[in-house]
Image (cartoon, rainbow, N blue to C red):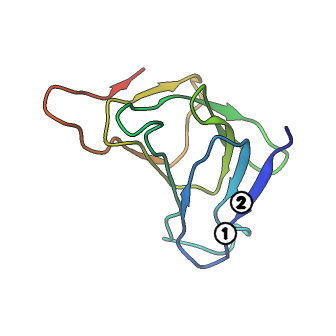
Amino acid sequence: MSARNVEGRNDRAHIFIDTSLHEKFYGEQDPLYGSGIVDTLRFSSPGGTQGVDLTATVIAGPLADHLHISSDETGEDDLLGIERIELTDNADRFHVNSDQMNFATTVDAGSQPAGQYDGAE
């Protein structure tokens, strides 16, 4: 399946909702725009009660590197100009598959019911 582009507008903060399609999420379209603006990719629980299991990898690009997020639940996604990732309110796993993760990206683990915890590797 080919990737679907989901593009934000310059100088605007966006909240994108992830789906099971292969998507390329673009925050700011131009590096000269958006200083201080935070674009967010939000994940939801597949089925409502389970968390997501995501793997983040750095992809080298011709102009700039970007994040690639993969998961059995949510598919394959590319994040360009996304400054914040919000996980679900259930027990999630977030794997970092690179020693070159030098992005100013915040990962918000959300909140969990008592006894559940997020994990990171």
Q: Secondary structure at mark 2?
A: strand
Horizontal side of 20 relative to 39 (left or right) equals right
Q: Can you give x and y, in whole percent of width and height, for residue 50 in the image?
A: 38, 31
Marker disc for residue 44: none
Which of 78/113 is in front? 113
Q: Is residue 99 above or below residue 109?
A: above
The answer to whether marks 1 and 2 mark residues whose Cβ atoms lie closer than 8 Å is yes
Residue under numbered circle 1? 8
Look at the picture and state if 113 lies above or below 104: above
Which residue lies under the disc numbered 2?
A: 6
Mark 2, other Cα within 10 Å: few <14 / some 14–19 / many ≥20: few
Q: Nearer the viewer, residue 68 or 114?
A: 114
Q: Is residue 86 left or right of residue 60?
A: left
Residue displayed at 81% across by 51% down: 63
Quadrant location of the C terminus in the rendered image = top left
Residue reaching furthest bottom? 11
User: Residue drawn at (59%, 36%), measured in percent from left and top?
Assistant: 74
* The N terminus lies in quadrant: top right
Q: Amino acid at mark 2?
A: Val
Q: Nearer the viewer, residue 7 or 88?
A: 88
Residue 81, image x and y in percent? 63, 57
Instruction: Name the residue: 31% across, 45% down.
Output: 110
For the residue pair 29 and 102, the one nearer the viewer reads as 29
Provide residue 22's location: percent of width, then percent of height. 73, 41
Q: CA distance from mark 1 to mark 2?
A: 7 Å
Judge the density around disc 1: few (<14), some (14-19), many (≥20) Cα neighbours within 10 Å: some
Dot 1 falls on a residue whose secondary structure is: loop
- Report the residue that reaches farthest toward the left: 114
Instruction: Name the amino acid, label 1.
Output: Gly
Give the left or right position of residue 74, taking residue 106 as reference: right
Counting from the top left corner in percent of width and height, residue 26 is at: 69, 59
Count of labels in the image:
2
